[in-house]
Amino acid sequence: MTSRSPRRALQSLSLPQARRVALAAQGFADPPHATPTMRTLDRVVARTGVLQVDSVNVFARAHLMPLYARMGPFDPALLERASSGARDRRLVEYWAHVQAYMPVELWPAMHHRRAEFRARRGKWGMGADPMLEPQVLAAVAERGPVTARDLEADLGATRTKEHWGWNWSQARKVLDFLYLTGEVAIAGRTRSFEVLYDLPQRVLPARVLEAPTPTREEAELELVRRALRSHGVATATTVADHYRMGVGPTRAALRTLVESGEAEEVTVEGWRRDTYLATGARLPRRIAARTLLSPFDPVVWHRERAEALFDFHYRIEIYTPAHRRVHGYYVLPFLLGDRVVARVDLKADRRRGVLSVPGAFAEAYAPGETAVQLAAELRRAAAWVGCDSVEVGGVGDLAAPLAAALSDAG
């Protein structure tokens, strides 16, 4: 009878260690650049993997916030430069997490996703009329970059008003389906945030379009590799969520990464699910972060992970009726050190030049310096969005200390 070699004991991380690994992987241990440059932006996107796009502009748009959280106040023109021009384009929008900016190098890895959208038209077609596809493609080829609004008159299409938020014309439905399948791509956005559609060959660098198409397994392995690097330490469920993959293929890819030495299985204090650590992931002695996070930041967008990692229960309440909201309309977490210690309801009143804080709430474990540190961060954030002052309302246990800290600083 042959004896089996005993299984090597798994490395064990305490919860504070896991937090520091996760935040370092997301770029919060990187040395700051005095003036953020394109190099800084490239480094941030290499950490986050994607930048989720959202149209809400109560404080700042969702895709700008992760850059601000890691780079500090920066010129949004940097992102515009990175996501424009086919020759030098670094980022392109696609359904990579949900709607998100992703590195252009991921375009080939999304081939099978685009093919699946086409194959499952019944689910993803969004009511788009297939008979209009040749006409829409021809119009984009002739007029692109073009908005759906630009094409509506040409196609004789009108918007419907039966369903708020989904009153898309046929032109918009067809364009969005063709975007999912990769027959058109997003060239940019207008000042009013409308999508500009164009042909992929006029949006993406030739080197990207000419790159070999990976097999599905190769693509999934690359996506999982990138996702794990972005999280540092994570469960299979968290890794799968990053690029919205199935958990089964994600587990298979993680096993491959373990076998190749690019990842290892570990245990984390209090976590019961299988957990993986990216080989080479940093474990700094401390994290010196002090910043606001978007509701769509990779640090907190997987709510189950945010609760397990930070003991931070977080739900966005934009779509919750006002009388049922607990913390407010657009509530941003406040990261201090390696803990999410508070949350604030924010609204930038750009007309008056005021950053309004209707509510501020401390977590149970928030340190005594939270109000002072949050006041400093709010002043920095206010200046970034073009506001001269910060006004604090009376909602939440942190409101009064925060108002006092702002007053003292003033």
Image: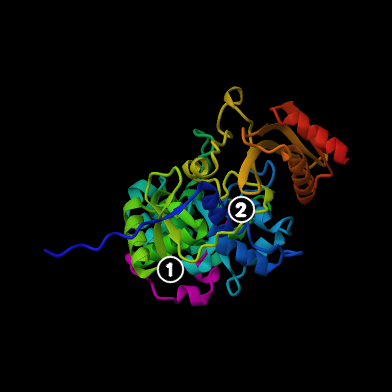
Can residue 144 be seen in this snapshot? no
Neighbourhood count class around disc 1 (C-alpha, 10 Å): few under 14, some 14–19, many 20 upward: some
| Residue 197 within the magenta-colored segment of the rendering | yes
Q: From this view, report whether residue 16 is shown above or below residue 137.
A: above
Quadrant of the rendering where the N terminus is positioned: bottom left
Which segment did they paint magenta? 195-217
Residue position marked by numbered label 1 in the rendering:
108
Neighbourhood count class around disc 2 (C-alpha, 10 Å): few under 14, some 14–19, many 20 upward: many
Residue at image location 47% in from the left, 63% down from the top: 226
Q: Earlier in the sequence, mark 1 or mark 2?
A: 2
Relative image position of residue 344 (x, y in whole percent): 68, 36
Type of amino acid at the residue the image marks with label 2: His
Residue at image location 41% in from the left, 55% down from the top: 266
Tell me the SS state at disc 2. loop
Residue position marked by numbered label 2 in the rendering:
63
| Residue 300 within the magenta-colored segment of the rendering | no
Relative image position of residue 385 (x, y in whole percent): 76, 48
Tell me the SS state at disc 1. helix
Q: Please indicate whether residue 334 sits to the left or right of residue 312 in the image.
A: right
Q: From this view, report whether residue 97 is shown above or below residue 303.
A: below
Relative image position of residue 122 (x, y in whole percent): 33, 47
Q: Please indicate whether residue 72 sits to the left or right of residue 207 in the image.
A: right
